[in-house]
Image (tube, grey):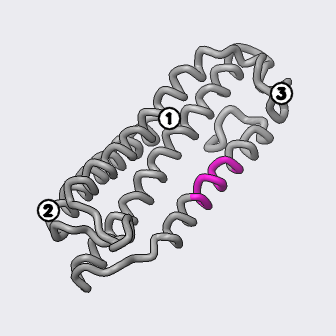
Amino acid sequence: MDLMITFLKNFSILVFVVFVLGVYNSVPEDVAFGIDAIGKMDKSHFFYAMAAFVILMNLFLTIFVKYFNAIPVQKFKMPKRDFWLENEESRLAFFYVIQSWAYSLMAVFNALICLILFKIYKINDLAGISGINLLPYLLLIVFAVVAWIGFILRRFYIQKYSIWE
């Protein structure tokens, strides 16, 4: 399962890069989506802002996983704590669950950003320069993150090392 989640994370980054390059190549010099008073943003600024945002978010989650593994499990307050502290295998399973959760969150985040990029492309392609309401897509991202946080909290109630067994 670890291989599949890592593949999805890396594949989502590759898809994001393809989407950014495709959108960058096909949008006009002024990208419309309501960034300033006129509702336009320069194409190169748009490209660098999107790339920096996704790179920083992925970097943050990667660093989170690396440093999270250095913290002793005993310091965490979690549901069914006795099960997750029972032996070395359960402590390793705890870190595996956190790592899988963070990597899958990266994949979902990258996919949602690709959805926003696609919407920006379609608005600029079909209507020329016009405004776009990104609020539904931003709400979708917030909902996905809240759902993912809820999943990790619920996952620790399941007293199995793998939910796939």
| Between 33 and 155, the one nearer to me in the picture | 33
Disc 1 packing (10 Å; few <14; some 14–19; many ≥20): some
Q: Which residues are magenta?
A: 142-150
Mark drawn on residue 25: 2
Q: CA distance from mark 3 to mark 1?
A: 24 Å
Residue 110 position (above or below residue 75): below
Mark drawn on residue 81: 3
Quadrant housing residue 28: bottom left
Q: CA distance from mark 3 to mark 2?
A: 51 Å
Name the residue beneath numbered marker 1.
Answer: 61
Quadrant housing residue 79: top right
Closer to us: mark 3 or mark 1? 1
From the image, give the main secondary structure of the stretch colored magenta.
Answer: helix
| Between 165 and 56, the one nearer to me in the picture | 56
| Percent of width and height locating residue 36 | 37, 66
Element at label 3: helix
